[in-house]
């Protein structure tokens, strides 16, 4: 990995223990965290985790050292980042499904807290939500399989006469089969033809939107994942430039100019991650800590974007929105 691909905060000393940490271990911990994106795009997530850990008594440089690696949201890059951390950490934190799958592959001998992962049972990260087993636990992003169908329903409610909807997907992201199963089930019932568009990196996004234009796409669903989160602004800008009404999983994309989103609070998920770390440092094993699901989803609507696209948001949908950007 090239040096410019990551930034790290270093210091402290620790001993790695397989599958859990012992309460009698000296209270000076090392946490390694791999984030898909740059410090500019996902640094606020790292900050939220650190702030909550400090609230719990873990002070950076005193009794904890957090090593943050910012890497491209791609499987190989995340696997390499995790490998580089493993000799020097007590516990690993990964974000998104790509990160979770990478950790499952290469980090079997250190406790892992995954955050904002889609369907961790379906993709083999844990045995069950209630009893994870193994060395991994954390939080999901989706509370139910119907979430993507809900996003498609919302988009169709806004553009009822449009039939062709593109699905922007990150190639290699284990979220994709889970999401597509939900979308494919609903699409015929609401009269929608789905056109999947795959990207491997941010560099592929302009060509992806060109492909949407060639296929006469009339709307866009963006599958949640580390790549789409880290590139929220670029995706929002392209959707607006190509005049595509878009539905997202992340509030950040709608704040940046996307049309509508429904999903959990990413900062709240990071704060929950700090609670897992605290429990493991106190002697709990990941195998015994149930995976938590989001207890609240927020709908955000950008009326400025709707106006730019010449759309009228139905009053009933606006009444259900948790936040309206005007």
Image (cartoon, rainbow, N blue to C red):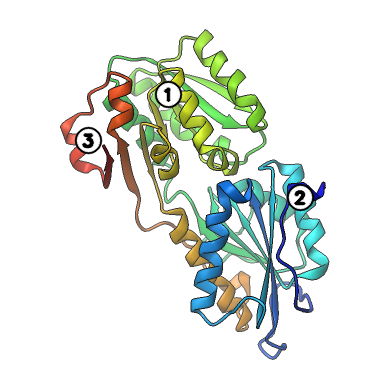
Q: Decide: few, some or many residues near mark 2? Use Cα within 10 Å; few <14, some 14-19, many ≥20.
A: many
Nearest to N terminus: mark 3 or mark 2: 2
* 94 with respect to 245 (left or right): right
Secondary structure of the residue carrying numbered label 3: helix
Q: Which residue is mark 3?
A: 317
- Mark 1 surroundings within 10 Å by alpha-carbon count, few (fewer than 14), some (14 through 19), many (20 or more): some
Residue nearest the observer in this picture, 167 or 137: 167
Labels 1 and 3 touching (C-beta < 8 A) = no
**Mark 3 and mark 2 residues within 8 Å of each other at the beta carbon:** no
281 sits left or right of 215 in the view:
right
Mark 1 secondary-structure assignment: helix
Residue 21 image point, x, y percent = 69, 79
Cβ atoms at labels 2 and 1 below 8 Å apart: no
**Residue located 36% across and 31% down the image:** 259
- Using the numbered discs, state the Cα–Cα distance from disc 3 to disc 2 in whole angstroms: 41 Å
Q: CA distance from mark 2 to mark 1?
A: 34 Å
Residue at image position (16%, 32%) is 315
Residue 88 locus on image (x, y percent):
80, 69
Q: Is residue 103 above or below residue 67?
A: above
> Of the numbered discs in the image, which one, if any, rests on residue 240?
1
């Amino acid at each position: 990995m090239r040096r410019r691909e990551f930034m790290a905060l270093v210091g402290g000393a620790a001993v790695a223990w397989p599958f859990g940490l012992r309460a009698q271990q000296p209270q000076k911990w090392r946490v390694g965290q791999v984030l898909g994106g740059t410090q500019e795009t996902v640094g606020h997530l790292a900050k939220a985790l650190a702030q909550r850990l400090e609230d719990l008594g873990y002070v950076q440089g005193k009794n904890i050292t957090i090593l943050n690696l910012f890497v491209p949201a791609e499987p190989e890059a995340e696997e390499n980042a995790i490998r580089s951390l493993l000799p020097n950490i007590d516990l690993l934190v990964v974000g998104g499904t790509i990160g979770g799958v990478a950790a499952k592959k290469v980090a079997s001998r250190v406790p892992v807290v995954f955050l904002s992962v889609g369907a961790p049972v379906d993709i083999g990260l844990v045995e069950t939500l209630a009893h994870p087993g193994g060395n991994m636990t954390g939080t999901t992003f989706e509370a139910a399989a119907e979430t993507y169908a809900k996003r498609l329903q919302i988009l169709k409610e806004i553009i009822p006469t449009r039939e062709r909807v593109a699905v922007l997907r990150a190639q290699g992201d284990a979220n994709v089969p889970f999401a597509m199963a939900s979308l494919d089930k609903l699409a015929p019932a609401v009269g929608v033809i789905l056109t999947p568009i795959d990207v491997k990196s941010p560099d592929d996004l302009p060509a992806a939107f060109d492909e949407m234009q060639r296929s006469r796409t009339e709307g866009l669903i963006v599958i949640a994942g580390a790549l789409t989160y880290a590139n929220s602004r670029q995706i929002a800008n392209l959707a607006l430039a190509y005049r595509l009404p878009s539905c997202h999983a992340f509030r950040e994309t709608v704040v940046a100019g996307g049309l509508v989103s429904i999903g959990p609070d990413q900062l709240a998920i990071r704060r929950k991650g700090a609670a897992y770390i605290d429990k493991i440092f106190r002697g709990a094993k990941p195998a015994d800590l149930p995976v938590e699901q989001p207890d609240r989803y927020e709908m955000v609507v950008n009326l400025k974007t709707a106006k730019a696209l010449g759309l009228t948001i139905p009053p009933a949908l606006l009444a259900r929105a948790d936040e309206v950007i005007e």
